[in-house]
Image (cartoon, rainbow, N blue to C red):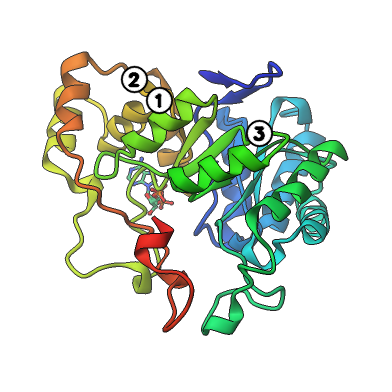
Amino acid sequence: MKYLEYKNGDKMPILGLGTWKSAPGDVYAAVKEAIKIGYRHIDCAAIYGNEKEVGKAISESIAENIVVREELWITSKLWSNAHGRNNVIPALKQTLADLQLDYVDLYEIHWPVAFKTTVLAPEKPEDFAINEYPIPDTWKGMEDAVNQGLTRHIGGCNFKVAKLEELLLSSSIKPEMMQVEIHPYLQQNELVDFCEKNGILVTAYAPLGSSDRPAGMKAKDEPVLLQDELINSLAQRKGISPAQILLGWLTHRGIVAIPKSVNPVRLKQNYESVEIVLSHDEMGEIKGLNKDRRYVDGSFLIVENGPINKSNLW
Ligand code: A2P
């Protein structure tokens, strides 16, 4: 395994297991199998609705002496209905109870958009609470979580550069990780460069193109990343799978990848992708695929006459 190092010396495995879209009935077996294969990094979130099952798999793996807590890197995320300084710790405590852990390694603001505390998914403008819970206020709650030892590191997801700049200015504990969608169709060069210059690590979600997203999140005729011609011809040439090309491309850039799988064969294949070496020319060929194609475009945040639109979100 390869690792990225945080400022305090903590090491995060560059490849983790994604759990978004893993049904509660599947994720328990997937996490247990992943830990057996060697995965030491699990990416979770309260809104995925499966943290209890993930927690059961983790605690059993520890009880069975397959792994110790200190070897694991567990990330979770604050949902948008728990923004605001005073709401962060209770939300994180719920996540910790579900995961059966005393602390997470990394806690992230899932989206830089606040909802009313009673709202899981906004339907109308009144469901938002953007003025009530500005990001700097929520971030104070994230800092409280570090100070109380409930998380070792804090970060965010789905921030654009301008929002990250604001956060850097208003924070006393700086964000150390930014998780965004990244793959060859959405290479995020500006954000990755900004993070590198500011000492922020980067995680790529949807590294395989997330083709198991709910139908309502899919555009008609969208390009299927795993079926890309170049990715497939490179895979054939190197005798590896298209998914391994996509994951190798990320880790080669020093970006954490969290592919989701609930299938033992694919879990192993994805785990082994960290060993893949891509040449300068191969990286160059893949660079040519960028088309700023977002699969997870945040459209669930866009309601008629609401505060969020594509241009202020991205
Ligand atoms: P499955 O869970 O049945 O393996 P992403 O991580 O970008 O969200 O993509 C997840 C999707 O990719 C899921 O449909 C998952 O299916 C599939 N997947 C995961 N690993 C591989 C692989 N190595 N090859 C092909 N498809 C994969």
Residue 16: horizontal and vertical position, in percent? 53, 35
| Horizontal arrangement in the rendering, residue 39 relative to residue 220 (left or right) | right
Contact, mark 1 vs mark 3 (Cβ under 8 Å): no
The circle drawn on residue 174 is 3
Residue 1: horizontal and vertical position, in percent? 52, 19
Cβ of mark 3 under 8 Å from ligand 1: the answer is no
Sequence-first tag of 1 and 3: 3
| Residue type at numbered disc 1 | Thr
| Residue type at numbered disc 3 | Lys
Which of these two is toward me, 29 or 13?
13
The circle drawn on residue 251 is 1
Sequence-first tag of 1 and 2: 1
Which of these two is toward me, 301 or 131?
131
Q: Which residue is mark 2?
A: 276
Query: Vertically, is 219 above or below 151?
Result: below
Contact, mark 1 vs mark 2 (Cβ under 8 Å): yes
| Residue type at numbered disc 2 | Ile
Where disc 1 sits, the SS reads: helix
Q: CA distance from mark 3 to mark 2?
A: 32 Å
